[in-house]
Amino acid sequence: MKVILRESYENLGRTGDVVDVKPGFARNFLVPHGIAYPSNEFYRRRFTAERDALLRRDEERRTRAETVAERASGAKLEFKMRVSERGQMFGAITNANIAEKLAEQGVEVDRRKIVLPQPIKNLGEHTVVVRPHGDVEFELLVHVVPESAPEALRELSIRELVEGVEEEGAETAAAEGEQPGEGEPAGAGAGEEPAAEEAEKGKRGKSDVEIVEIVEAKSSTAGADQDGGERERKDD
């Protein structure tokens, strides 16, 4: 679809140029936002009547855009974002966030003039292009840092990972060593010594009982013999 540009627009052309664009882009964006007219007889006459005014307005916009570029070119914008312990960022930074941060520094830029194909989702430094006018562009630096303490973001080295695995394996082996082996009843190893002591005590107790019984038997026999001797003397 052909349209007549009412102002200079990035990657399309300057004021008064007739360009060919996709129908959806023209109907949904360029024409509704007053950036272009449909290229037909009615709008060509209309543009001719407005041409001088549109050219003056475009020149004024270009001058303002150059002023913005002088102030903001090379600027560094810092964003603090919440992150996980591994450094994964929660949320993302959009062109609207960048425009808001610029406004805090006294630089007004339409968010649509900030070229950001995808929201920023990683920590670190990112170069962003801004085109406040079709003929003017500049770059700024977006620096994304974590809100949490740096210690929470420390990456584990290979050595630490290996040592961690070894320690975990040692603890698991120790825990398994304390447990009874396969097929062995619980407490079998730990209860061997107490069981042996109980058996020994049982043996000693049994021996003591037998000795007492023997002594009592001998005493009974001796007493019986003595009584018999006394009865014999009396008979004599």
Image (cartoon, rainbow, N blue to C red):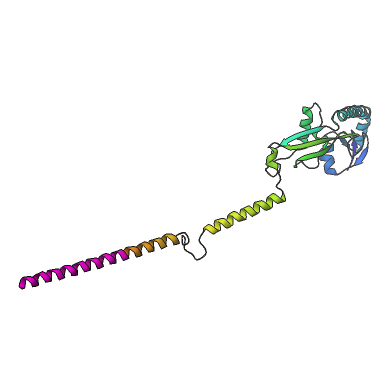
Task: Report the front residue among 123 and 170.
Answer: 170
The residue that appears at 72% across and 35% down in the rendered structure is: 80
Tally the marks: 0
**Residue 204 in the image: x percent, y percent?**
34, 63
**Residue 48 in the image: x percent, y percent?**
94, 31
Task: Report the front residue among 235 and 205.
Answer: 235
Q: Main secondary structure of the magenta part?
A: helix
| Residue 157 drawn above or below residue 53 | below
- Check residue 209 for magenta coloring: yes
Quarter of the image that includes the C terminus: bottom left
Residue 32 seen from this side:
no
Task: Report the front residue among 24 and 123.
Answer: 123
Task: Report the front residue among 143 and 159.
Answer: 159
The residue that appears at 87% across and 34% down in the rendered structure is: 138
What span is colored magenta in the figure?
Answer: 207-236
Of all residues shown, which one is farthest toward the left? 235
**Residue 86 in the image: x percent, y percent?**
69, 45
Residue 215 seen from this side:
yes
| Residue 206 drawn above or below residue 9 | below
The residue that appears at 60% across and 55% down in the rendered structure is: 170
- In screen coordinates, is 3 left or right of 102? right
**Residue 142 in the image: x percent, y percent?**
79, 36
- Check residue 213 for magenta coloring: yes
* Quarter holding residue 40: top right
Quarter of the image that includes the N terminus: top right
